[in-house]
Image (cartoon, helix red, strand yellow):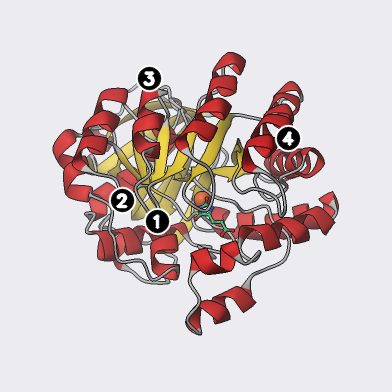
C-alpha cells in the first residue's frame, strides 16, 4: 500500500462541487484507490510507504474526452484564409478543411503519424491527463480509418495513458463522392472491419450541413448498436439539425459542441443520461458567437464535460487546462463545473465508470497540483501548475 498525505483533496465524489477535503489522505493498493478520508481518520491497520505533498491540491487525473489528435499536416493557411474573411464552411465547401487533412493523413506513414501524435499526447500527460479519447475521421477510406485507430491504440502502449478510441468515419464525405454511397459502401464496412480488429471503443459522427444528416448518422448508429458499441455525436455545432435529439434517442454517451442545442434538447439529454461536451477551443477558433445553453443544461441536470477537440482545423488547442479556462470565461461554466467536466463527467462521456473521482475502488489516476484552491486550475491562462501525475498507482 502507498499512503498519499499532507494534501488537500478535491475528490469530485459528490454530484456537484469539488468534494473538498482539507488535510486528507489517500491509500493506494496497486492500481486502485483503497481508502480516502481525513488524515486523522486513517485506519490504524494500514501500513505502507508514506508520501507527503506539503498541502498541495490532489484531483483525479484529468480526462480529455474529445480529441482528433492523430492527423497529418497542419492547416495554418486555412487559419490565414479565415482571418482574410473566408468562413469555415466556405473553406470546407471549396475542398479545404477536413478534406485537406484527409490527404495529409492518407499520405503519412503509421510511424510518422504515431511520432507526431505522441508529442501531442505528451503535452496532455504533462498537464495531468490520464485518459484521452482519440477519433479516426481523417481517413475516409477503409485503410486510413483503420491506420488512424491502430496509431491511437499504439499510443496507449507507448505511453502511460489510457486511450479510448472512437470511429468517426462519418466525419466528412471524400472529395467527389456521394454522401449516401460513402456511408453505406465505405463508412459502415470500415466500421465493421475496425470493430473486428478490436480497434473501436465507441462510434461518433458529425451531424451538420457540411457533413451528414440525422438520417445518414442514424444508419451508422444502427450498425453500432448491432455491434454493441456505444455512440456519441458532434451535433448542433454550426446550426440546429436535430442531431442532439437523434443522439438522445439512441442513448448516446455524449453529444459534443451543442452550441445550437435548445431547451427541449437539454430535456431530452437529461432523460437519456447523455453528457453534453463543451468544446470552447472550436468556438474560439471559429469566432463563433452562439454559446451552448449552459443554463438549460443546469436546469435539466444534464452532466457537462469539457474537452480540447484537439484537431488541425477548428481547434488546434493542445491544452485541457486552457479549455477549462475558456469554458469558464467564454461559456460561463463555474470552475467546479469545468473540473467536473474534465474528471467525473468526462469519464461518463466515455462510458467509463472506473475513474474520474477519488473514491475507493476506482483507478488510482491522480493529479497533484502546485495550487491549493481548485478554482486556480480554471483561473490561470496558459500556465501549467502540475506537480506530479499518478497513473494506475505509479508515482
Ligand atoms: N467538428 C470539429 O470541430 C472537428 N470535427 C468536427 O466534426 C473539426 C475537424 C477539422 O476541421 O479538421
Ligand atoms: Fe471534434
Q: Which of marks 4 and 3 is in front?
A: 4
Q: Residue 186 carries which label?
A: 4
Q: Name the residue under label 1.
A: 238
- Whether residue 364 is visible, yes or no, is no
Instruction: Say whether marks 2 and 4 touch (CB < 8 Å).
Output: no
Label 3 to label 1: alpha-carbon separation: 57 Å
For marks 4 and 3 on the same chain, the one whose residue lies earlier in the sequence: 3
In the picture shown, does residue 55 fall above or below 65?
Answer: below
Q: Mark 2 points at which residue?
A: 260
Name which residue lies at 57% across and 28% down.
220
Name which residue lies at 45% across and 59% down.
386
Name which residue lies at 66% across and 64% down.
95
Identify the element where label 2 is drawn.
loop
For marks 1 and 4 on the same chain, the one whose residue lies earlier in the sequence: 4
Image coords of residue 2 (percent x, y): 48, 34
Image coords of residue 218 (percent x, y): 50, 28
Q: Mark 3 points at which residue?
A: 45
Label 3 to label 2: alpha-carbon separation: 54 Å
Looking at the image, residue 73 sits to the left or right of residue 179; the answer is right
- Whether residue 197 is visible, yes or no, is yes
Q: Which quarter shows the C terminus?
A: top right
Quadrant housing residue 105? bottom right
Is the distance from the Cβ of mark 3 to the nearest ligand 2 atom less than 8 Å? Answer: no
Please tell me how crowded label 3 is: few (under 14), some (14-19), or many (20+) other residues with Cα within 10 Å. Answer: few
Q: Which of 387 and 63 is in front in this view?
A: 63
Quadrant housing residue 224? top right
Please tell me how crowded label 1 is: few (under 14), some (14-19), or many (20+) other residues with Cα within 10 Å. Answer: many
Instruction: Say whether marks 2 and 1 touch (CB < 8 Å).
Output: yes
For marks 3 and 1 on the same chain, the one whose residue lies earlier in the sequence: 3
Amino acid at each position: 500500500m502507498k499512503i498519499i498525505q499532507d494534501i488537500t483533496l478535491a475528490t469530485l465524489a459528490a454530484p456537484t462541487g469539488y468534494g473538498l477535503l482539507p488535510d486528507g489522505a489517500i491509500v493506494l493498493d496497486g492500481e486502485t484507490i483503497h481508502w480516502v478520508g481525513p488524515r486523522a481518520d486513517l485506519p490504524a491497520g494500514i501500513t505502507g510507504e508514506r508520501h507527503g505533498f506539503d498541502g498541495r491540491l490532489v484531483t483525479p487525473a484529468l480526462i480529455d474526452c474529445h480529441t482528433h489528435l492523430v492527423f497529418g499536416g497542419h492547416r495554418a493557411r486555412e487559419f490565414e484564409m479565415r482571418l482574410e474573411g473566408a468562413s469555415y464552411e466556405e473553406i470546407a465547401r471549396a475542398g479545404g478543411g477536413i478534406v485537406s487533412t484527409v490527404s495529409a493523413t492518407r499520405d503519412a506513414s503509421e510511424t510518422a503519424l504515431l511520432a507526431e501524435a505522441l508529442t501531442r499526447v505528451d503535452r496532455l500527460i504533462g498537464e495531468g491527463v490520464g485518459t484521452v479519447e482519440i477519433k479516426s475521421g481523417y481517413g475516409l477510406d477503409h485503410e486510413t480509418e483503420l491506420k488512424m485507430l491502430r496509431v491511437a491504440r499504439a499510443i496507449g502502449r507507448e505511453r502511460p495513458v489510457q486511450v479510448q478510441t472512437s470511429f468517426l468515419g462519418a466525419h466528412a464525405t471524400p472529395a467527389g463522392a456521394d454522401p449516401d454511397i460513402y456511408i453505406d459502401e465505405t463508412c459502415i464496412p470500415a466500421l465493421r472491419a475496425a470493430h473486428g480488429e478490436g480497434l473501436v471503443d465507441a462510434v461518433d459522427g458529425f451531424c451538420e450541413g457540411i457533413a451528414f444528416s440525422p438520417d445518414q448518422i442514424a444508419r451508422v448508429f444502427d450498425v453500432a448498436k448491432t455491434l454493441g458499441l456505444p455512440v456519441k455525436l458532434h451535433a448542433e455545432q454550426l446550426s440546429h439539425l436535430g442531431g442532439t435529439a437523434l443522439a438522445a434517442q439512441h442513448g448516446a454517451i455524449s453529444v459534443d459542441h451543442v452550441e445550437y442545442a435548445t431547451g427541449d434538447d437539454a430535456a431530452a439529454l437529461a432523460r437519456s443520461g447523455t453528457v453534453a461536451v463543451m468544446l470552447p477551443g472550436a468556438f474560439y477558433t471559429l469566432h463563433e458567437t452562439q454559446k451552448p445553453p449552459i443554463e438549460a443544461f443546469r436546469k435539466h441536470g444534464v452532466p457537462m464535460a469539457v474537452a480540447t477537440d484537439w484537431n488541425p482545423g477548428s481547434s488546434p488547442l493542445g491544452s485541457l487546462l486552457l479549455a477549462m479556462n475558456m469554458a469558464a470565461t467564454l461559456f460561463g461554466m463555474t470552475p467546479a463545473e469545468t473540473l467536473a467536466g474534465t474528471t467525473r463527467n468526462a469519464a461518463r462521456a466515455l462510458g467509463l465508470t472506473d475513474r474520474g473521482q477519488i473514491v475507493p475502488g476506482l483507478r488510482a489516476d491522480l493529479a497533484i497540483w502546485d495550487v491549493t484552491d481548485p478554482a486556480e486550475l480554471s483561473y490561470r491562462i496558459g500556465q501549467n501548475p502540475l506537480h506530479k501525475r499518478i497513473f494506475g498507482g505509479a508515482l
